[in-house]
Image: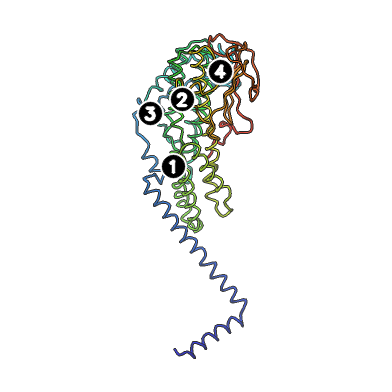
């Protein structure tokens, strides 16, 4: 073709564009409409392949089947979770069968339990004792289950009509009930100043977490955080009420520290990666591979990327981990409407971060409270500063996981207060403490004061426990994550 022919072809094409401008625009738009989905799909598939390759290279599970393959297989007689199910179910049936569904029972019934450190009223003690005595074999079964080394509940899912795992939280509800049952047992024993049984029950409570430690999904880890909070609060009551020995208190400190160290949500986030990926595959298959599912590969890749980032972050020290998990949540919240999968699959990592922070703070306050009680047993007075606890009663002063500052402590002649940015534990003395004069008042007032004195020889006369109203309680967080 000569140069003249080329010029003729160009003139012909430009002449067509000039003669048919609307047709030209329509043709360009049609070309873009056809090519854009293809480009989006190809780019999404490339990004999805890159993300999945990184997950594979790290040796992490990518599908729900791979998550299940990681879970331990434990004989029923050695499985803490199976034993909890076996012994907690009859107790729960008994509570539900009572008049008013056990509404007079602290913790287990409708009735709200008293502030930490206050005695249960005689009616509450009597009702609780009757329940525990009636179900004594099952309660002892729960105590024996806590001695087992590990546990694994059945995965908390059923398959829906599309073959997608759907949450069935029966096992999680039952686990919470088992924890509250032993908390009630410890409280009754502490109210009766039965120090040895109360200590044994508190140790068993800290070990029950092993039954949920490998349970997949964020709903399970939120259940663990709620249980850890109840355990920490119960321990503070029992320490105030019962005359525990220094050796028993020291053992409780170790148990709290071990429990705190096992609360990372990293495994739960990794399990959610597999859950979301398998749910997506099954949903797409059930719809016959409709084109719309193919076009969301980029969205799917972003879901995997953000969840993997959250899982990696959860393995860092808690402050760094929480900051990064919150960043993931902010990225999710800022996504535009055309990322529907990511917005649905990643509901709220910030809720998990807040619940983790609160549970750790409660356990650290409980551990510090125990150390203060040990100090009082040894020296006959309360410490002026938390520094006095180191190194005899604690290796170091615990920090507030919310801001990285040491836990706050205030001592006055009428009481002492241990607090983080979200929790405040306030001990009030029945008489001024002449050995500990102070000049500064307590930084916060309890929600309700009590004058109920108890017989513990080395404890305060009343204790209040306040969760800051401006921070969501872990037990009010969404159960569907």
Of 264 and 157, which appears nearest the observer? 264
Residues at circles 2 and 4 in contact by the CB criterion of under 8 Å: no
Nearest-to-viewer mark from 2 and 1: 2
Q: In x, y percent, where is residue 412?
A: 62, 18
Q: Is residue 437 above or below residue 263?
A: above
Of 163 and 43, which appears nearest the observer? 43
The local secondary structure at tag 1 comes to: helix
Q: How busy is the neighbourhood of tag 3: few (under 14 within 10 Å), some, or many (20 plus)?
A: many
Q: Which residue is mark 1?
A: 270
Q: Is residue 262 visible to the viewer in this orientation of the structure?
A: yes
Q: Earlier in the sequence, mark 3 or mark 4?
A: 4
Query: Would residue 439 be found to the left or right of residue 158 on screen?
Result: right
Nearest-to-viewer mark from 2 and 3: 2
Q: Earlier in the sequence, mark 4 or mark 1?
A: 4
The local secondary structure at tag 2 comes to: helix
Nearest-to-viewer mark from 2 and 4: 2
Q: What is the CA distance from the residue labelled 4 to the residue labelled 1? A: 41 Å
Q: Earlier in the sequence, mark 2 or mark 1?
A: 2
Quarter residue 464 falls in: top right
Of 252 and 222, which appears nearest the observer? 252
The local secondary structure at tag 4 comes to: loop
User: What label sits on residue 98 in the rendered view?
Assistant: 4
Q: Which residue is mark 3?
A: 150
Nearest-to-viewer mark from 3 and 4: 3
Residues at circles 2 and 3 in contact by the CB criterion of under 8 Å: no
Query: Would residue 295 be found to the left or right of residue 451 on screen?
Result: left
Residues at circles 3 and 4 in contact by the CB criterion of under 8 Å: no
Q: What is the CA distance from the residue labelled 2 to the residue labelled 3? A: 17 Å
The local secondary structure at tag 3 comes to: loop
Q: How busy is the neighbourhood of tag 4: few (under 14 within 10 Å), some, or many (20 plus)?
A: few
- Residue at x 59%, y 30% (from the top left corner): 422
């Amino acid at each position: 073709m000569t140069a003249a022919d080329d010029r003729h072809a160009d003139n012909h094409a430009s002449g067509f564009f000039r003669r048919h401008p609307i047709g030209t625009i329509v043709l360009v738009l049609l070309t873009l409409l056809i090519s854009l989905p293809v480009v989006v799909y190809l780019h999404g598939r490339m990004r999805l392949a890159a993300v999945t390759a990184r997950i594979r290279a790290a040796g992490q599970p990518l599908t729900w089947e791979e998550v299940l393959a990681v879970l331990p297989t434990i004989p029923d007689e050695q499985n803490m979770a199976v034993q909890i199910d076996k012994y907690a179910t009859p107790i729960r049936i008994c509570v539900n069968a009572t008049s008013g569904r056990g509404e007079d029972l602290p913790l287990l019934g409708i009735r709200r339990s008293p502030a930490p450190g206050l005695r249960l009223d005689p009616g509450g003690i009597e009702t609780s004792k009757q329940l525990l005595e009636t179900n004594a074999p099952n309660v002892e079964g729960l105590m024996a289950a806590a001695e087992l080394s590990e546990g694994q509940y059945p995965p908390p899912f059923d398959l829906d009509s599309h073959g997608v795992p759907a949450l069935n939280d029966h096992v999680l509800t039952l686990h919470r009930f088992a924890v509250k049952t032993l908390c009630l047992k410890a409280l009754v024993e502490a109210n009766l100043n039965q120090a040895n049984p109360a200590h044994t029950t508190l140790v068993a409570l800290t070990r029950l977490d092993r039954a949920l430690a490998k349970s997949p999904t964020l709903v399970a880890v939120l259940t663990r955080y709620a249980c850890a909070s109840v355990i920490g609060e119960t321990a503070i009551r029992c320490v105030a009420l019962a005359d525990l020995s220094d050796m028993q208190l020291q053992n409780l400190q170790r148990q709290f520290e071990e429990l705190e160290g096992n609360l990372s949500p990293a495994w739960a986030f990794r399990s959610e990666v597999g859950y979301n990926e398998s749910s997506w595959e099954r949903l797409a298959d059930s719809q016959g591979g409709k084109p719309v599912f193919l076009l969301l590969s980029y969205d799917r890749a972003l879901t995997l990327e953000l969840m993997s980032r959250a899982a990696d972050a959860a393995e860092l020290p808690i402050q760094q981990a929480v900051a990064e998990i919150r960043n993931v949540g902010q990225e999710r919240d800022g996504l535009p409407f055309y990322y529907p999968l990511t917005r649905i699959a990643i509901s709220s990592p910030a809720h998990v971060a807040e619940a983790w922070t609160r549970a750790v703070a409660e356990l650290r306050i409980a551990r510090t409270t125990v150390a203060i009680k040990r100090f009082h047993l040894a020296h006959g007075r309360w410490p002026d500063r938390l520094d006095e606890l180191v190194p005899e009663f604690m290796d170091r002063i615990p920090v507030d996981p919310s801001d990285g500052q040491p836990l706050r402590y205030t001592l006055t002649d009428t009481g002492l207060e241990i607090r983080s940015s979200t929790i405040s534990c306030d001990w009030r003395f029945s008489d001024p403490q002449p050995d500990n004069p102070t000049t500064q008042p307590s930084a916060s007032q309890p929600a309700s004061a009590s004058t109920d004195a108890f017989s513990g020889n080395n404890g305060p006369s009343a204790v209040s426990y306040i969760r800051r109203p401006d921070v969501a309680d872990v037990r009010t967080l969404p159960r569907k994550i």
